[in-house]
Image: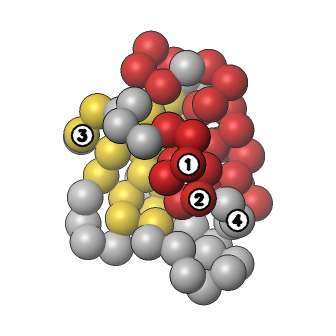
């Protein structure tokens, strides 16, 4: 089950996320869901994304600036 993204800034395009041992799934308000895992995105990037998701801040910016297309669609 996905968690609601806190979206502290109120400007994020992300609505929900799901954290697993070696991945994070991110759902955007347009309904698209993307899977970021250790293999496609890198361990340190996924762990940073998990921290952003749990804090409710910076996840969309991190994806847009650091990750770009290192994901798999779910």
Q: In the rendered image, which residue does mark 2 sit on?
A: 61
Residue at image coords 34%, 73%: 29
Q: Which colour scheme is used?
A: secondary structure
**Mark number for residue 65?**
1
Check if mark 1's residue and mark 2's residue have beta carbons within 8 Å. yes
Residue 5 seen in the figure: yes
Q: In the rendered image, which residue does mark 4 sit on?
A: 57
| Camera-side mark, 3 or 2 | 2
* Left or right for 11, reference 57: left
User: Dot 1: within a 10 Å radius of its alpha carbon, few (fewer than 14), some, or many (20 or more) residues?
Assistant: few
- Residue 3's place in the image compared with 67, above or below, is below
Tell me which label, 3 or 4, sits earlier in the chain: 4
Check if mark 3's residue and mark 2's residue have beta carbons within 8 Å. no
- Residue 27's place in the image compared with 44, above or below, is below
Tell me which label, 3 or 1, sits earlier in the chain: 1
Tell me which label, 4 or 1, sits earlier in the chain: 4
Image x and y of residue 36, in percent: 44, 34
Dot 3 lies on which element?
strand
Gap in Å between the C-alphas at discs 1 and 2? 6 Å
Gap in Å between the C-alphas at discs 3 and 1? 18 Å
Q: Nearer the viewer, residue 42 or 69?
A: 69
Dot 1 lies on which element?
helix
Gap in Å between the C-alphas at discs 4 and 1? 14 Å
Check if mark 4's residue and mark 1's residue have beta carbons within 8 Å. no
* Left or right for 27, reference 67: left
| Camera-side mark, 4 or 1 | 1
User: Dot 4: within a 10 Å radius of its alpha carbon, few (fewer than 14), some, or many (20 or more) residues?
Assistant: many
Image x and y of residue 57, in percent: 70, 65
Q: In the rendered image, which residue does mark 3 sit on?
A: 73
Dot 2 lies on which element?
helix
Choose top left, top right, bottom left or bottom right for residue 69.
top left
């Amino acid at each position: 089950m996905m968690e609601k993204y806190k979206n502290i800034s109120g400007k994020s395009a992300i609505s929900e996320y799901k954290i697993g041992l070696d991945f994070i799934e991110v759902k955007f308000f347009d309904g698209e869901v993307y899977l970021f895992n250790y293999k496609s995105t890198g361990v340190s990037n996924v762990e940073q994304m998990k921290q952003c998701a749990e804090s409710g801040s910076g996840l969309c910016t991190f994806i847009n600036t650091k990750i770009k297309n290192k994901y798999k669609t779910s």
